Image (cartoon, rainbow, N blue to C red):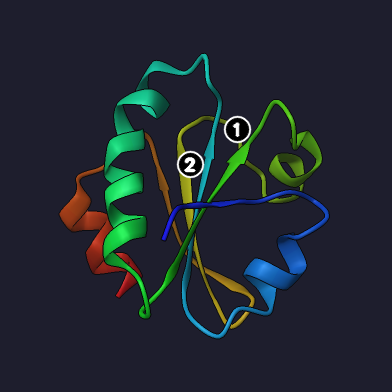
């Protein structure tokens, strides 16, 4: 499974109404730490099948969502469960730390 491309139009359905935990990566193509984190996020999307969803929000394209969730620096990872934010990580993260928070 690839990462979900999250937008204002599909956020409620794919994140807030999800039946599993959702890892949301707020990123931008010009952000070097975001680009360094991208392979980890891709790998997690593959490995999370059946246990969680993994999605990405380009803050340049979806500024309204970034503002709504108070994203001030990127990368920011937010984990949602049952439509609620349960964990937030800012900056480059280790895969193990993200997995611990997600599962």
Task: Assign a secondary structure to mark 2.
Answer: strand
Quadrant in which the C terminus appears: bottom left
Residue 35: horizontal and vertical position, in percent? 38, 24
Q: Is residue 95 above or below residue 58?
A: below
Q: Left or right of 39: which side holds 70?
A: right
Quadrant in which the N terminus appears: bottom left
Q: Is mark 2 in CB contact (under 8 Å) with mark 1? A: yes
Q: Which residue appears at 36% of the width and 79% of the height?
A: 51
Residue tagged by mark 1? 72
* Residue 76 numbered tag: 2
Task: Assign a secondary structure to mark 1.
Answer: loop
Residue 39 lies in quadrant: top left
In the image shown, does 79 or 54 lie closer to the viewer? Answer: 54
- Whole-number angstrom distance, CA of label 2 to CA of label 1: 8 Å
How many numbered dots are placed on residues in this image?
A: 2
Q: Mark 1 packing: few (<14 Cα in 10 Å), some, or many (20+)?
A: few
Residue 30: horizontal and vertical position, in percent? 52, 14
Q: Is residue 82 above or below residue 53?
A: below
Residue 73: horizontal and vertical position, in percent? 53, 30
């Amino acid at each position: 499974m690839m990462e979900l491309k999250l937008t204002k139009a599909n956020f409620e359905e794919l994140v807030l109404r999800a039946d599993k935990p959702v890892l949301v990566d707020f990123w931008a193509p010009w952000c070097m730490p975001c680009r360094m984190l991208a392979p980890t996020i891709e790998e997690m999307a593959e490995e999370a099948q059946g246990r969680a969803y993994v999605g990405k929000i380009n803050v340049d394209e979806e500024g309204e969502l970034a503002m709504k969730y108070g994203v001030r620096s990127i990368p920011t990872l937010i984990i949602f469960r049952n439509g609620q934010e349960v964990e937030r990580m800012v900056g480059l993260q280790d895969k193990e730390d993200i997995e611990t928070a997600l599962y």
